[in-house]
Amino acid sequence: MPELRRRVDELPPELGDMFQHMLNGINPRHREQGARLLKICHTYIQAYQDGIQALGLALIDDFQSGTGHGAVLKCLDRPSKLSLCEELEGRLRSRCGGLLEFQHEAWSPNCFCGSGLGSFVDHRDLVDVEVSFMHRSVFEFLSSDNTWELACLQVPDNNVDVATALSMYGLQLAMQSLSLPSPSPDQIWRFLIRATLWNIEVVRRNPTQPAYFLESLHLVLNAISHLKFDDQLLSALARGALFHGTELSMAHTLIPLALKVGAVGYVQTHPNFPAVLAHDRTSCGCLPLLLQVVRQGPTSEGLTNLPVIFPDVELDLYSQRKTIELLLCSGSDPNEPYENHVSPWEDWVTLIGIEGYNDLQLLEVLGMAEMFLDFGADIAKFGLKDWVTGHCLGFIASQQVRTKAKELLLRTQGSVATEGGSLPRKRALSVGERSGKRARTGF
């Protein structure tokens, strides 16, 4: 294999014929499975510009979108994981003609072997290896027009929907993250978020929610609920989902996850969004949606081709402003105290005080502050004025930031005479008004 890679490196870019020859050399009875593996890996690498975890690929290798076969989740021990990955390595050679291979020299930020994230040596186990193309030109070949129309790359439509398979990939790896001696909340979140992103793409194409995705998600949440985490949001997510009835239970999970990735269109059209937003939390212990969005901050999944893969999702400060605006427009109260008498507004002001921002981000934060004030946030509390003065009026800040900050401060000065120091609250929009606003503005 190293010799083949060296020879490919020396060849000119016109490699299509050679790759087709390699694909045609695959045993005909294995071509369908090989094409499915290539398509899954190509889509994943296109989204993340990184290899796919071998363990996750092994766990969805036999997944069939039409039936959900292969979607059962359970925590595996290390020998079982190692056996799956060893089998996958041999399968890639026979099914994919050498175009996909294990990247033994690459370090993975994820740990499934249980050795911890301490050093490169700890992760040479096949369990933590990533799979990628044997050469960058293979990816370019598969990205070319008409490549997937080749006879050797045909897969029956009912056997693979890549977005569905990758949503299960995320859930499988979230579950395997829970099998470790010391599960990492960050790693669990990473794969729950990826599962959610791919599932949102599935629903965007076909609004009928696959039952096996929800069933599998429930299994992951059930496993999370039996463990103790310092991560309050993760624990609350599992606790709230398992407390409620089946249909609403999944909404209590899918909606916060969708808000975490900025999928406001998905949330706004979800039939259970009003119920999740307004339900009584005194017995279930769920965190208010606005508090969850504020505490988790914007999520970055490193998707370099985000508009191509997920056209309705934005993972940045702008997406956080959109999700906060959706919740405020839908009736969330920024001053509503929750635990220890802390409100979403207080949390937000506290969190912006410990972050560093460039000029564009400062403008975004000032815009969010203005939006909170529009909906009755208590201006006189929590040191917003001090933060604006200290971070947005210095000589380092741009003229645009200073102008925006002065406008905000002038606005707050006019509010001190109002009771509690808050501006008159904007009226929450009805469902029909929110739909009309979205049609006019795209939000």
Image (cartoon, rainbow, N blue to C red):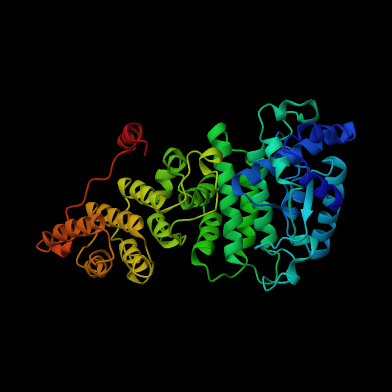
Q: Nearer the viewer, residue 96 or 184?
A: 96
* Residue 373 appears anywhere in the view: yes
Residue shown at the point (64%, 57%) measured from the top left: 174
The reply, left or right, for residue 400 in relation to residue 248 is left
Q: Toward which corner of the image does residue 404 lie, by quadrant?
A: bottom left
Residue 443 coordinates in the image, percent (x, y): 36, 39
Residue at point 37% right, 47% down? 322
Task: State whether residue 340 is above or below residue 34.
Answer: below
**Image vertical order of residue 136 relative to residue 385, above or below:** above
User: Depth check: 135 or 408 in front?
Assistant: 135
Q: Is residue 62 above or below residue 398?
A: above
Would you say 305 lies left or right of 359 here?
A: right
- Tell me which residue sits at (62%, 50%) in the image: 217
Place of residue 301 in the rendered image (x, y in percent of width and height, measured from the top left): 54, 53
In percent of width and height, residue 343 lies at 32, 64
Residue 138, position in %: x, y?
A: 73, 41
On the question of residue 333 being in view, the answer is: no
How many numbered marks have been drawn onto this rendered protein structure? Answer: 0
Q: Quadrant of residue 46?
A: top right
Please state if 51 lies on the left or on the right of 363 as rendered: right
Whether 176 is drawn above or below 150: the answer is below
Instruction: Determine the image quadrant of residue 107.
Output: bottom right
